[in-house]
Image: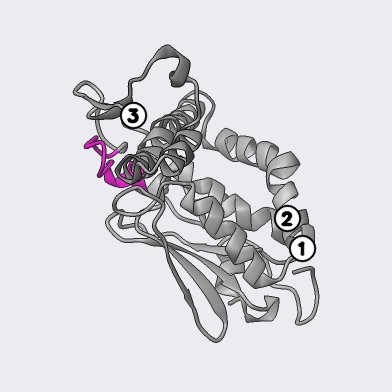
Amino acid sequence: MLRLVDMARLGRAVRQEDVDDLGVPTQDQLVRAIDEGRLDDAKRLAGYMVTEGKSLHDLFCDWVWDMQTQIAKRWGEDAVGDVLRSSQETWMLRRSWKGFLGMTVPERVAVTAEIMRAHHGGPKQDGALGITEDEHRFSIRMDPCGSGGRMRRGDPVDGTPSRLGAPYSFGVTQQPHDWSWGRTDVPYYCTHCAMNEILPMEWGGHPLWVTDFEPDASKPCHWHFYKTADAIPQEYYTRVGRTKPAAGEGRY
């Protein structure tokens, strides 16, 4: 029988079941509840799947930002940029670049929406996004995203404070860099979004998507997917120290 028990120390419910059931994936328990007609239990499990995945996700995001902060303290900000490049230019972003080149722009948006839903964004940290389309682009609105946005604002679900202050005091850029969009005061964690633009520009001339980073943490950030490379404004190249290819050049 399903038991979701509130644990005061965690501030949320946790599955507490017989030992034989503790290792059963929650999605399997949800399907079992539906099959057995326990619809209220199924609804509770559907909501629980969000909080179950969020705690580990958030821990790793916090840890990455803290490690970047420690790198900057020990070896300087240039080392942060070096680590971003050396990690993202190999398997991580190159895999995405190669895969996206074979997709239509709407397919890229659909795949990215799936990723960002799993990223636990939105005011309830349940993966909610705002997605719009106009003549030139698709836009994904994150208010906040589940990593940099959540950490800058503080966690609205767990009730923990902004990672920019105590007890975390995670770092931000002290100097402008191409990998911080030429800005200071960009959280080290968020700079990977700038590198997500820089590397595809180096490989194929154009970014696969561009980020509208919002310095005010209370406001949403956006990812924009332009329908054609020619429609991408020059400003998105200039801010990372690159030049937009001539019309029709590059890979997109």
Look at label 2 and name its amino acid. Trp
Q: Calculate the distance from the C-alpha at mark 2 to the C-alpha at mark 1.
A: 6 Å
In the displayed structure image, the side of residue 121 where residue 84 appears, left or right = right
* Mark number displayed over residue 97: 2
Q: Main secondary structure of the magenta part?
A: loop
What stretch of residues is rendered in magenta? 150-162
- Residue under the point 63% across and 81% down: 231
Q: Quadrant of the N terminus?
A: top left
Examine the rendered structure and indicate whether residue 199 appears above or below residue 47.
below
Q: Tell which circle, 2 or 3, labels the residue nearer the N-terminal end.
A: 3
Instruction: Answer left or right for 35 relative to 193.
Output: left
Question: Upstream in the sequence, badge 3 or badge 1?
Answer: 3
Residue 232 rendering spot, x and y as whole percentages: 61, 76
| Above or below: residue 252 compared with residue 175 | below
Relative vertical location of residue 12 with respect to residue 105 in this rendering, above or below: above
**Residue visible at 63% across and 71% down?**
106
Element type where label 1 sits in the image: helix
Q: Which mark is residue 90?
A: none
Q: Residue furthest left?
A: 8
Q: Which residue is mark 1?
A: 101
Mark 2 or 3, which is nearer the eye? 3
Residue located at (55% from left, 86% from top)? 135
Q: Residue at x 71, y 61 (%)?
A: 201
Eye-nearest disc, 3 or 1 = 3
Mark yes or no: residue 180 visible: no
